[in-house]
Every structure is written in structure tokens, then in C-alpha cells.
Image (spheres, coloured by chain):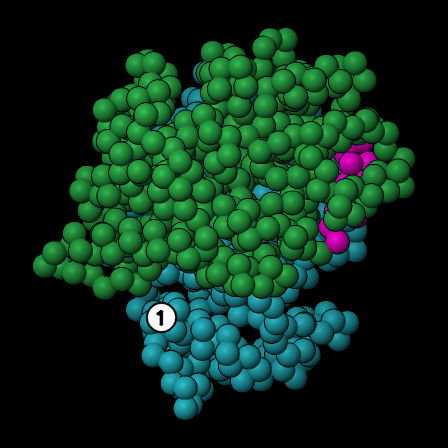
Chain colours: A cyan, B green
Amino acid sequence: MKNFEFHSPTKIFFGRETQKQVGEIIRGYGFKKVLLHYGKGSIKKIGLYDEVTNALNESKIDFIELGGAQPNPTLNLVKEGIGLCRKENVDIVLVVGGGSAIDSGKLIAVGAANDCDPWLFSMGKKTPKSALPIGTILTLSATGSETSASAVITNEELKLKRGYNSEFNRPLFSILNPELTFTVSPYQTACGIVDIIMHTLERYITMKGNAEVTDRIAEAVLKSTIQAGKVAMENPQDYEARATLMWAGTLSHNGLTGLGRDYYMVCHQIEHEISGMFEEVAHGAGLAVVFPAWAKYAYKYNMERFCQYAVRVWNCEMDYSNPENTAIAGIEATAKYFKEIGMPSSLSEFSITEDSFEEMAEKCTNYGERILPGLIEYGKKEIIDILNLCK
Amino acid sequence: MKNFEFHSPTKIFFGRETQKQVGEIIRGYGFKKVLLHYGKGSIKKIGLYDEVTNALNESKIDFIELGGAQPNPTLNLVKEGIGLCRKENVDIVLVVGGGSAIDSGKLIAVGAANDCDPWLFSMGKKTPKSALPIGTILTLSATGSETSASAVITNEELKLKRGYNSEFNRPLFSILNPELTFTVSPYQTACGIVDIIMHTLERYITMKGNAEVTDRIAEAVLKSTIQAGKVAMENPQDYEARATLMWAGTLSHNGLTGLGRDYYMVCHQIEHEISGMFEEVAHGAGLAVVFPAWAKYAYKYNMERFCQYAVRVWNCEMDYSNPENTAIAGIEATAKYFKEIGMPSSLSEFSITEDSFEEMAEKCTNYGERILPGLIEYGKKEIIDILNLCK
């Protein structure tokens, strides 16, 4: 087990009706002026907008609004939000939505408290020194952004999608009511399931490191997600399944599932280039395509780990005479599961061809400035090889 | 899954040599005056005292000392610490030690910031309004007090041991270096293993509630602890085993293993009466005696749950025609394990006889003022029945 630091200070309010506590919670912290940030209006359709604004009004919390956050959240909206926060002396950003809206809110909260172009944080050129606090009411089980230190944003002009980590990105509190995900479409539900699985898997399948408790917790999150995912796809209003997905989504990305081990999210990095260039690709759908391709490319470099995954998570039988069979069985079980829940298995399903691979690989290596670490080192050639397996 | 709140804000610094960062960490928070609280001097023998005081001196942190915390920490020492904090304007309590020293430190930190007898908190007669921050350097994997909201203390005059929970009891940071536990005696190591298992088990085996992720995480903690416990007993300097026990100990009691389910720590309550009256009984050793007795008494009230425990944690075979066999097999596997790591299996090993049971049961019910909830309701009669099974 390698040395680690762990800090997940976000306070969680989990369960039915918890969104109605939001006014009380914010008042408890002593905040008075809120920027209410949300997406494209689905929260109005399901009545959540009214519940939240009523709760704020009842607690006499003053708020201004900024809607319009979209999947693969964009830098221009972030800049608008930063301007609003400064002009209106906002003291907390409250996001009602999924990971994209939350990430947009995180960049607003950080940007409002730092005097530079927020894109510089995303590109790793600057480090934030402060941030407004952020609270969330989650409507989608997927990104884990409700407690994570990460925020991903798309620069529309550059067609570049980049994530960065900072302790300032961690929300002060998050309200998690699984009922708010009952109306999420089957496709979006499946994308979320893949994202939760991949946040855990990219921490789990790594080169080195023995971390038994962390391993078993990661397996716990994976098994629960796989099981509940099936149930939620069949019955979108199954509270227990939705609750499992929601809590697993949070745990998959708060740090817990990777403690004591080095990891690097290679599939996420490659996928960001796909959905960065082709905005019709949902992040989870992109990951469902990339993982099996990456895994088939990479499993030889840590066969033991792929076998452990196959045996412990998918109950594959261990083939001691030919462990390769076991490793591949685990990868195939994952690919099959993704397909069963309605995810794509190739880029051709999005009409994306190899014509784009060169550009994706260029961007993914920051035009030759970085090599991705992991089971092996991934330069331009390796990334193109993996993209070719995604065709 | 029942509604829950979860907040585990303690920042963790985990791994080799991390105790040397303590000065830097405290300076980072801006604190200037420390009460250094520890036990009976074993930290001096292993050189830890020097490392800590050097680190504080190097970072120019001023400190005063209070040693002498003992197993089943006592109220008189707490009162001395409170006096010191007030007189010397201490702004953080730093505890170097195991759960007893930490609990003693917690009562000092809370007591110093509230103007009443700290025993009133332990008896649930008053609720703290504030506390000094507390940091810990852990030397024993057992109580989970390094992140938990609970603190247990013994009132020497009344010969009463009581725990209470408060968010003010959660440490600001905890430094966890598994190497610091290499010199813990086999007996104390075993006591710690039992405590970790029991913190998890008392949250796991409950009446109602479906909470799949929580279940699987609890099983992850249990399995890792059982496995690493054996290794650490055989080779006290096995870093991985000690690391697993240390991190499992923290996770077992930070809340994570019981989320979404009601629970009540009945075995802990009963054990507190034993070690409260007989100070030669270590808490873990007492729990090792109480659990199998309690389980044999209680399993009929939730057979399914005991079976799940037996099958998932101990790999017992499920006997569908007679589930009782499976439930009992799980209980017996636990009792056997406790015995194998050198724990007692009856009160007679401490020469404690049924003469004390009446008094223990009186105290455990606060002289008839409370009935313990759980799989069933435990009044005086039930507690005596369980104690009789401990003989």
C-alpha cells in the first residue's frame, strides 16, 4: 500500500425528499446569496425547480439564476456565471443537475474567486488559490462530481475537453435523492452506469500496488453497480436500484476506490478526445467503446490484475494453465454487459472513422507535449492503436 | 436504503514516515499552541515522542504536554487536560496514541470549549456546542476513533464507562503510519482486530434495511481484516497486513459501513459494563466473549442476515433446507477465529462469575431507565441471559 492522503469533506444528505432541506441547510451555514445553476430545464419539467426555489424562499435565501448548462459543459457559460457571481456578491453556488452542470458550477465557483481565465486551470497552467463554496442537488448518477475534486469542461473554440483536480472543487454539501433519477432516460442511465464502473475500474486495474481493503471496496462498488444497473434498466422507478447507483456513483469517484495505489485514467483521457470532437457522443457511451479496446491492448502488461477482476467481479473461473483466457473472459463479460444495457461497442455506430484518429491522438498528447502513464506509456502511436481497436 | 447523513471530514495522511509531517500540517492550519496528549510512555520507548516533538520544534509550534492516558480513559485526567487548555490558551489538541488516548483527547477538546462537567456529555444530559480542533497520530489499529464521532470514557468514582457521539468529536486530521503498530503486542493486536470486526458487524447484522453497497463494503472490510489479522499475528512487522488493519480500522467506524440502515451497538454496550467494572478486561477481549453469546441468543430474529454473513464473509455453504445450520456456522467460524488469534471465549477466563451479572445489567439499562433496541429489545432480563451465555 503506497502512502496516500484522503480528504472527502463533502457532507452528504441522502434519501427521499432531501431536496426540500436545501434552504435550511444553506441557512445553517450562514450563506445569504445563492447562484442557482442548472441545465436545460428538465428540472422544471419534473417539478424540482419549484421545490428548490420554494425551499430557498421559505428559508429567506436570496438567489439569482443561471440555467443552460449542457452535456460537456462549456467555457462561455462558465464565464457568464463568474461575471454574475462577482456582480451580485454571491456567496455560494448551488447546482441542481448532473455532472455537467456541477462541473460548470465548480468552474464558476473557482473562477469567481481567482483573477484569471478559468481555462488556465483546466490546462494545468495555473492553480486556484481559493473558491466560492458549492452545494449540489444531484439528478444523475454518473460522474461522482458531487464529491470529487475534479471538473471537466469543453472549450468550444478549441474543441478541447479537459479535466483538472483541485481540493477547491469539492462541494461543501451534496443532496442525493435517488427519486430524482427516476425520470432519467434508459440511455442516460446506461451512460451513468458505465461512468461509475469506469471510475472504479480505472483505479483498480493498475500496474503496481497491493492494497487489499481498497481492492475489495472497489469490487464492492463494481458488483453493486453491475447488479443494480440491470434492475434500474428494467424498472427505472426501483428505489433500491436507483439508490445503489447513486451512492456507488459517489463512492466511485471520491477517492476511496483508489487509495494506496497509483493510477491514471487513460480511458477517460482518450474518451475526452472523442466526445470533445463529436459532441453527439455521451461520455459514458464513449467509455463503453474505449474500455474493451484499451483492455484488449493492455491486459498483457498486468495479467494478474485482469484475472483478479474477472474472478472476483464477474465470477469467471480461473484458468491456471492459461490465465490469458481468464483475463479475456473478464473483458468480454464487461463488453457484453455494456452492450446489454444498450451501450455502443464501436465508434462506427457514431459514424466516426479513422480519419479523426490522428487529430484525437495529437490532442490527447497535447500535441506531443505529454505521454500518458499507466500500465504502459501511451504516446501518439499507442493511442492510435487503441482507437483502431474501437472502430 | 434508509435516508442518511454522512460526513467524514477528517483529513487522512496515511503511510510510512507520515508522523514527521505533523509540524508542517499543524502550521498549515495556522495553529500555534498545542496540547500534546499521550498515554503511559510507550511512545517514548519507540522513539515516536522524539520524532513528534522534533517535528513540532522544527515548525516552531509551541506545545505543552499531558501524558498518562490509560486504557479505559478516565475522567480525572480529562479534567486536568481541560484546565491546562484553558490556562495555556491551547488552540489544538494533538493526541499521539491509541483509541483510549484519542477519546481522552476528544473529551478534553470538547470540555475546554464548553462550560460544564464533561461527564454530562457522556451521560447524554448535555450536548456540546463547540470544541477545540483535534489531530491524532495513531499507534493502534482498533477503535476507529481517529475519524469517528464517538468518545468513550470511564468515570472512576462511579465505575461507569460511557460513550457518546458528537460531530465535534471528529478529528480535523489523523496521521496513520502502520509502522507505528509493529511493536503492538500480539494480545493488543488481537484485541484491535476484534474491535474492528465488531464495529463493522454491529452495523451489518441488524433487523431491517436493504443497503447493497453498504453491505458489500462492510463485507470488504470484514474479509480484509480477517485475512490481514492472521498475517499480522504471525508476522507483526508485515507492513501490508498492518496497513490493511489500520485502514480497515478507520473505515469500520467512520460511518461508511452502516449507511442506510438502522443499527445499535448492543455488544459494545454490554461489553462496556464488563470492562467498566473489571479494568483488567481489554475492550476487544470483552467483545470477543460477548459476540458469540449475543449471536447465539439473537440469530433467530434475523436468520437471513446471519446466513448472508456466514456465506459472504466466511464462505460457509448455504443450507437451504435448514438455514439455522448456516447461521450457526457463521457464528462458530467467528468464535473460532477469535480463539485462534488468542482471544478469550468466556468470562470465567477473567474469573468473572454470575455474581456480577445483576449489577452489570442494572448499569447497562441505566438502572431501568433504558431498554436497548436492536434485533429485539434488551432489558435487564435479556442482558442477564446473554451474560449467562458468556460464562
Main secondary-structure element of the magenta-colored stretch: helix
| Quarter where residue B167 is shown | top right
Residue drawn at 65 percent across, 55 percent down: B182
Which residue is rendered at x = 30% and y = 14% of the image? Answer: B368
Residue B308 percent coordinates (x, y): 27, 53
Residue A137 appears left or right of A177: right
Q: Position of residue B350 (x, y in %)?
A: 42, 38
At 58% across and 33% down in the image, what residue appears? B71
Q: The N terminus of chain B is located in which quarter?
A: top left
Identify which residue, A341 or B151, lies in the foreground: B151
Q: Is residue A349 above or below residue B57?
A: below
Q: Quadrant of residue B299?
A: top left
Residue A236 position in % (x across, y down)? 27, 50
Residue occupying image coordinates x 54% and y 25%: B153
Q: In the rendered image, is residue A134 in sight?
A: no
**Is residue A233 depicted above or below B100 in this figure?**
below
Residue A264 falls left or right of residue A113? left
Q: Residue furthest bottom?
A: A321
* Residue at the extreme left: B321
The three-letter code of the residue at mark 1 reads Trp
Residue A212 picture location, percent across and down: 52, 62
Quarter of the figure that contains the C terminus of chain B: top left
User: Which region of the structure is painted magenta?
Assistant: B17-30
Viewer-nearest residue: A387 or A231: A231
| Furthest residue in direction front, as rendered | B351
B154 left or right, relative to A319? right
- Give the camera-side residue of B12 and B301: B301
Q: Dot 1, crowdedness within 10 Å: few (<14), some or many (≥20)?
A: some
- A3 over A84 or under it: above or below: below
**Mark 1 lies on residue:** A314
